[in-house]
Image (cartoon, rainbow, N blue to C red):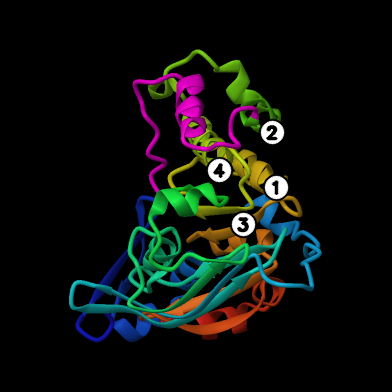
Amino acid sequence: MLALSDRITVLHLGRVIADGSPAAIQAHPEVRAAYLGGREAPRPAAEARAPAAADAGEPLLAVEGVDTFYGKSHILHGVSLEVRPGEVVALLGRNGAGKTATLNTITGLRPPRRGRIRFRGHEIAGEAPERIARLGIGLAPQGRRIFPNLTVADNLRIARLARPDGAGAGDAVLQRFPKLRARWRQRAETLSGGELQMLAIARALVGDVRLLILDEPFEGLAPVVVEEVYATVAGLRGTTAILLVEHNLDLALALADRVYVLDRGAVTHTGPARVLLEDLDLRARVLWF
């Protein structure tokens, strides 16, 4: 866009925050803040958590040199990443960087052309999505994809059906989501946005889930609801490993222990999340245009 445009208008939260040449837009402080965070951050982001105690042994998930294609389009180029037990790892990058393709490759929706993916000691590259899920990977997808005509109870019951270890998991999950217990017999279409997101996360956690994948968990939520969902996700730290994709950088970096940055399908940066949370100049160099 910067290379093609003569003039750019930037909308953020329903208002125009900048209008001008590509060079002016690239240097505009409000545009940088909108994309990179760090100014007027939501309250939870100001309270960065202490890093989880990552297991020093084998990683829970290891992605090694993965190449993924969509038809003839080469999307992922040698992507490698690790998630250790109890750790929160953020996968960051602009739209089109390859974040969703990485999640789809891990969960079996888009098998890799080359590379290895190991989870709990099992080679899962190219395995069917249902087998990968039964090994203990839960996905709360972007857009939630809840069954709106079913109750909270039935949405969670469906998640238990295909998991041999999920029969007694509902009560344990609901202890983390008391709001859902209060809405147990309500149809999902009557829930608020925050309650729907909690239901999506709860559904992903049913069974012996060791790795929770969250794709844009704060998308489209009001600020007060974001804080509630943030607290729910933060409460999982140390017990369930999390691989997080999120455009709100302040929240993602406050939650995560480590980060991987993707650009055009390749990992361009990896390191501690706290460094990017606190160093806005580094964040701009790593994540800006």
In-front residue for pair 231/213: 213
Please say if the residues under marks 1 and 3 sit with CB atoms less than 8 Å apart: yes
| Among the two numbered marks 1 and 2 on one chain, the one whose residue lies closer to the N terminus | 2
Residue at 50% across / 40% down in the picture?
Answer: 222
What amino acid does circle 3 point to? Ile
CA gap, disc 1 to disc 4? 20 Å
Using residue 41 as the reference point, say whether residue 111 is left or right of it: left
Q: What secondary structure is found at the residue carrying circle 3?
A: strand
Q: Which residue is mark 4?
A: 223
Residue 153 covered by magenta stretch: yes
Residue at 28% across / 82% down in the picture?
Answer: 2
The image quadrant of residue 21 is bottom left
CA gap, disc 1 to disc 3? 8 Å
CA gap, disc 1 to disc 2? 9 Å
What amino acid does circle 4 point to? Pro
Q: Which residue is mark 1?
A: 236
Q: Which residue is mark 2?
A: 176
In-front residue for pair 141/80: 80
In-front residue for pair 152/44: 152
The image quadrant of residue 279 is bottom right
| Among the two numbered marks 3 and 4 on one chain, the one whose residue lies closer to the N terminus | 4
Q: Which residue is mark 3?
A: 242
